[in-house]
Amino acid sequence: MDARTVLVLNGPNLNLLGEREPEVYGSATLADVEALCREVADGAGLTVDFRQSNHEGTLVDWVQEGRRGIAGIVVNAAGYTHTSVALRDALSTCRVPRVEVHISDIRAREAFRHHSYLTDVCDHHVIGRGVQGYAEAITWIAARRG
Ligand code: DHK
């Protein structure tokens, strides 16, 4: 990773995008999302390091890896959004712009999804915009770089 890298992190069950609750998350697969991110980043002169894990500690390790010296972090922590103090603490150590993304509108779903531990340690939020939200997040990071 270098100063032009956007680190895009995906949490648990997002590997099943496309087959998982398509009425909520849509029909795009995670590979489709990765291709979208690469296209948008490429257009902005950035590169993408795209990762997914079902494991909280792995996500923490990856946030720490990207905490300085890169263009920014886009994070859809999926279920860990609503549970993970550890991920929140990792994001709060970052010296790079952080964007929280959710495909669905978590504010309009079950009450347990309304609270995000990540919201106030991220600099920007794209919620409920479908997978296009990832593109918006990368565009925001690119615009912030000027
Ligand atoms: C994805 C998940 O897996 C859920 O646990 C979150 C998020 C919402 C999304 O909308 O991308 O509650």
Image (cartoon, helix red, strand yellow):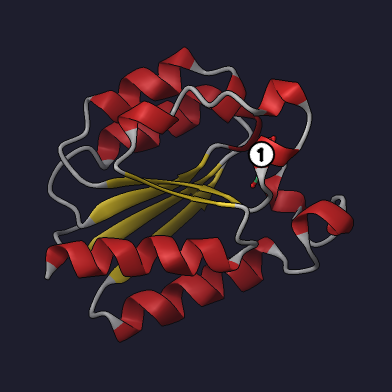
Residue 39 x/y as whole percent: 44, 81
User: Helix or strand or loop: what does disc 1 sit on?
Assistant: helix
Q: How crowded is mark 1: few (under 14 residues within 10 Å), some or many (20 or more)?
A: some
Residue 92 x/y as whole percent: 27, 25
Out of 123 and 52, give the one closest to the viewer. 123
Residue 11 x/y as whole percent: 58, 39
The quarter of the image holding the N terminus is bottom left
Left or right of residue 22, residue 107 in this image: left
Q: Which amino acid does label 1 sit on?
A: Ile
- Quadrant containing ligand 1 reads top right
The residue pinned by badge 1 equals 106
Q: In the image, what residue occupies the spot 81% across and 52% down?
A: 24
State yes or no: Cβ of the residue under disc 1 lies below 8 Å from any atom of ligand 1: yes
Q: In the image, what residue occupies the spot 53% across and 62% down?
A: 133
Left or right of residue 62, residue 77 in this image: right
Is 139 drawn above or below residue 17 in the view shown?
A: below
Residue 87: quadrant of the picture: top left
Q: Is residue 48 visible?
A: no
